[in-house]
Image: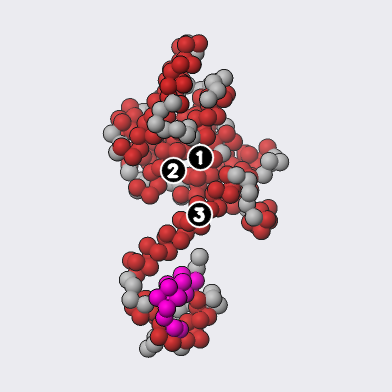
Amino acid sequence: MSCGTLVRKIRCSKRMTLQKTAKNVVSPSTLAKFERGESSLSVESFLAILQNLHISLHQFAFFYENEQIKRSEEFWRCYREHTLPKAQVEILKASENRRGFKYQLKTAYNTERTEADVMCFNEYFFEVEVWSLDELKLLAFKTDLLHIQSLERCRFVLEEQVLKGTYDGAYLAEVYEVLLSLYGALLVKKQHFRPRKEVYEHIQALDLKYLWYQHWLSLLLLLNDSICEKEMLGLKPTVESFLCSPFQKAPSCVERVLSCLGFSK
């Protein structure tokens, strides 16, 4: 959603006319063009329009972010379910910049991806130092495309960022989901992993709202230790107890690990 579209949405919700909203700032026709995305406003004019609408810049930013989040959540739901509208699929198909994020989206979405595409996907995430929210969502969805070296690199980078407090509260759920996905992918590839001591202590000290993450990480650590000690036979009751916990739905990355290791829900 553009700023102009949101201004129109707010104006209509307040039942204000173009004339009243644009008063002493710009002409009604100029404001109408801005709302349709046909022209822009100066910073001064934009702030004056907000003043006429009786909302602060902070409030506008809050509304704008909420609209973007709604749009993003809908996109990722369709992306994961492979039900993107045809127009969006065509946009992805048209992407030719192999080093761009849109191309990585295309690679992960396309079931007929080439080995060269997978290599570009690995190189992209191997080189990124701080991931955006959309990059985190894509990484959580498709860690199975990463090679061992990329998995280890991504894991190291993300653990570093967690300890530095790089990501704020809005990102933390996605960050922890990606960590679970990375640990799970390493398990699937039969690679021993152990979160750094500082990272593990950080995880154990998380707020109760992240208890789900601690729960499923504990299961992955248990499986990891059992693989290393080659003691998988007596684990079925323990795994079942984890699955019967208050956390009714195991993350897809955990389900993938259990399936690969021969455990059924």
Q: Secondary structure at mark 1?
A: helix
**Stretch in magenta:** 3-18
Residue type at mark 3: give it: Ser
Mark 2, residue position: 174
Residue situated in front as seen by the camera: 81 or 34: 81
Q: Earlier in the sequence, mark 2 or mark 1?
A: 1
Query: Residue 184 has which mark?
Result: none
Q: Vertical placement of 136 versus 196: above or below?
A: below
Q: CA distance from mark 1 to mark 3?
A: 15 Å
Which residue is label 3 attached to?
A: 72
Q: Which residue is mark 1?
A: 140
Kindly identify the amino acid type of the residue bearing the numbered disc 1. Answer: Ala
Q: Is residue 79 left or right of residue 206?
A: right
Contact between labelled residues 1 and 2, with CB atoms less than 8 Å apart:
yes
Distance Cα–Cα, label 2 vs label 1:
8 Å
Q: Nearer the viewer, mark 1 or mark 3?
A: 3
What crowding class fits label 3: few (fewer than 14 Cα within 10 Å), some (14-19), or many (20 or more)? Answer: few
Q: Tag 3 or tag 2, which sits nearer the N-term? A: 3
Q: Which comes sooner in the sequence, label 1 or label 3?
A: 3
**Element type where label 3 sits in the image:** helix
Q: Are marks 2 and 3 in contact (CB under 8 Å)?
A: no
Residue drawn at the location 51% of the way across and 86% of the way down: 29
